[in-house]
Structures are given as C-alpha cells and as structure tokens.
Image: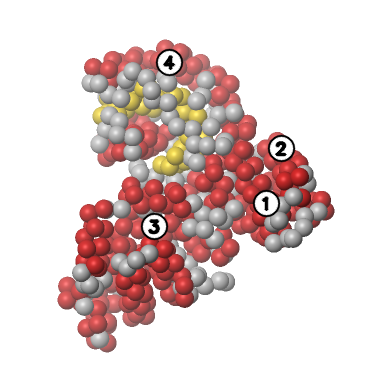
Amino acid sequence: MFDNLSNRLTSSLDHIRGRAKLTEDNIKDVLREVRMALLEADVALPVVKDFIAAVKERAIGTEVSKSLSPGQVFLKIVKQELENVMGKANDELNLRVAGPAVILLAGLQGAGKTTSAAKLAKYLKEREKKSVSVVSADVYRPAAIKQLETLAGEVGVDFIPSDLSQKPIDIVNGAIDYAKKAHRDVLIVDTAGRLSIDEDMMAEIKALHAAVNPIETLFVVDAMTGQDAANTAKAFGDVLPLTGVILTKTDGDARGGAALSVRHITGKPIKFLGVGEKTDALEPFHPDRLASRILGMGDMLSLIEEAEQKIDKEKAEKLAVKLKKGKGFDLEDFKEQLQQMKSMGGMSSMLDKLPGMGQLGNIQDKVNDKMFVQMESLINSMTPAERHNPDVINGSRKKRISAGAGLQIQDLNRLLKQHKQMQKMMKKFSSKGGMQKMMRGLGGMMPGGGLPGGGFPKR
C-alpha cells in the first residue's frame, strides 16, 4: 500500500536523517524532493503547498535549531504534518443513538459501496459486538440487491429484502421500522451509484437523506482514482452532510494521493480503508499509523490488533503447550502457521506493517502468497509420518513428494530449510523473552532464509 510514495519519501529523507546541523539550503533541497514525491503520488496541489509550507516553517524555526538531533526532529515534523493532513486521530463511527443507528453509504458506481456495506456490517458485528441489518436502496441495478443479500449471508448479518418496484425512500423507511421492531443496533443502507455526478442522482440521494436523517453518511470512493477521489468526495459533500469517507482498494494503490488529499479538500475524515476483496478486509483509518507506514517506520499496533482478531487462539494455545512440553515443531504445525499468516492477509501484508521494510527494496516481489501455496502443496504431498518427523525424508522420498506437489526438489529443500529455521524460532518463542526473539527471527521465513538475527537480504 502506497509503496511508490513510501519509497520516494524515505529516499528523500535519508539525505537529511543523519545531519548534525540543518540549514535552510539543505532543508530546501529535501523539501523539493518531498514536493515532487507528493505530486507524483497524485496528491492535490493545494495539499502539497500547505504541507511543504508547514514543514518548512517548523523546520527552520526553533524546533530544529535547539535539537541535539536535527535530522531526527525533521523526520518527526514530516510525520506530524502528514498526520495533520490526514487528520490527527481515528474518527470512530457515532453509534450513540437509540437503535437502529442508520449508516447511509453514498458514492459513484464501481467504487465498492455494496462490498463496503458487507465489510462494515462484519466489522460492527465482530469488533463492536453490534446486531446489524443491511438493506439495498439501489433500484437501478438489479444485481445490487442480490449481491448484498449474498454478502450478508456470508458475513452472517440480517438482510432486509427490497424490490425494484419500490421507491428508495419507502425501502429505507420500511427497513428502519423492521430494524426497530427487531431491536437491531445498526442499519446499513446501500444506495444507488452512478457513472458520473449528475443532478438527478444528487436530488434523489439528497431527498433520501432528508427523509431518513442517518446518524452517519459515509462517502465510498476508490483510492486508485487519486486526487479525483477527493474532488468527487467534495462534490458529494456540497450536497450531502457527509460525516466521513471509506477509501476502497487501497491495497492496489501504490501512490496514496487520495489518502493524503481527502481530508484537506473535503474537511471530512477518512474513517475506514478497504484493504482487499475479502469481507474482513476493512481497517479503521489511523492517520498516525499510516504516516508511520508511509515513512517506513512500520505499524506494529495494527499488526498486533490484526493478530488478536484473526489468529486462532485455541490452536496457538495448543502449540504453546506442545512446545513447553518439549515436543518438536513439526511440518503439520508449520502448515498451521502458514494458514494463520494467510488469514492475516499474507506475508506481504504483514511486511507492510513491519518497521524498516521501505529500506529493503521491493521485498514483496520476493515474498508473495504463491510461496505459501507451494509450501502447503509440498506438505500435503507428504505422509503423516513424514510431516511429524521430517528427518526421515531421504532422496527417494523427496522425488515422490515434489512430484506429487508438481514442484522441484529444490523447492522441497527450501521448505525443509525454512522449517528448520522456524523450529529454532519456536524454541526461542517458548522460552523467556520469546516474542522479541520471534520477531527478530521472522527473517527465517523469507526466501533464502534471511540473514542471522532476522535481517533480510538487501538488493
């Protein structure tokens, strides 16, 4: 996410990071590079101008001149100003109303409103422990109602049927009555999208909003449209009293222009990021954490929260007990760990949140989820005895296993080497101070085995 911007910014700031003294000249050179990085990331020009001016004013003032480490303070200023541009803190949904709290989703066609409705329903149900109903008021796209019904079934929330012959206002008023009687905490309303902003659409959604009076009105917009996302959000915001934005498809956005432009141009906070196609791929937007990720500082808080939500605690506990008893970490355990990492979005998603990844080149090119699929195929091709005791795997067994998985013997050798390294890591994990040792040893999972102490091979 935002790889291009992150690489450009960290590269620019490296020139100043270790300076013992900052002058107006060297600050000017770095800010010129930062300005180009932001413009290439499709950040809106007014945002870039205000950002550069704010950083420059603070950098050549007393903040830096009195510091023992001006380079580090400059980096801190850049981070804080990035946060200011995106909003200083996460803006939570306002659900403090007598049920149901109505959340209206608006946006252009193709932005991902219907999927976002299901993702938000799942998030509120699982993370906020709310009872949720969803309804579609899109009477122009027949597939939209069916799509929402299917997704509601997948995430296990209440779908309220609607019909193409009904008026959107009647659909939503009926859904509110139902949600009240059923004692639902939240009602999420998916509205019709259009291919472009037009007066009829705006009049319709304005009338719907006035009739329903939702507690939250969220604009759903595709991050990959860059600063156009912010401009479209502003056009909707001029008609509707938006309370926030859901930025979708950020996992495919290497630039980051939308995330850095929306708040400044619309005055509305980004509340959620869509980070993938799956129904659990929705993250609350934390400007401070995203600023850290953009500057290559990682985002350990989000990684820990994700682990708490998605890791199977029962399996983790069983493995911990097994390790404490001195029983080995076998290939069946290794396969389970791969599946746990996949549930967290795969290795590339985890690496995105680890500090220092920006300085290692495009590590995602070397580490991708195809690697997980190959490893699982090899393990599945083994007998139970081989999985529990990999030492018995000799030359003839290697031929059979690799052929069964449709892979090469060198792929199997790499798996066995990585398993050995993971074994060592798990022994450290089960001893005192294990978590820190495990994080340092994460490099053992990388292609080529990483470097001693958990380093990654530099290009």
| 178 sits to left or right of 168 | left
Mark 3 and mark 2 lie on one chain; the one further toward the N terminus is 2
Residue at the spot of label 1: 73
Locate residue 197: give its quadrant: top right
Mark 4 and mark 3 lie on one chain; the one further toward the N terminus is 4
Q: Position of residue 199 (x, y in %)?
A: 55, 19
Q: Residue at x 71, y 56 (%)?
A: 68
C-alpha separation, residue under disc 1 versus residue under disc 3 = 34 Å
Between disc 3 and disc 2, the foreground one is: 2
Towards the viewer: 60 or 7: 60
Cβ atoms at labels 1 and 3 below 8 Å apart = no
Q: Amino acid at mark 2?
A: Asp
Figure check: 288 above or below 109 = below
Q: For the residue labelled by badge 3, is the local secondary structure a helix, a strand or a loop? A: helix
C-alpha separation, residue under disc 4 versus residue under disc 1 = 46 Å
C-alpha separation, residue under disc 3 versus residue under disc 2 = 37 Å
Residue at the spot of label 4: 213
C-alpha separation, residue under disc 2 versus residue under disc 4 = 35 Å
Locate residue 198: give its quadrant: top right
Q: Amino acid at mark 4?
A: Asn
Residue at the spot of label 2: 50
Mark 4 and mark 1 lie on one chain; the one further toward the N terminus is 1
Figure check: 153 above or below 371 = above
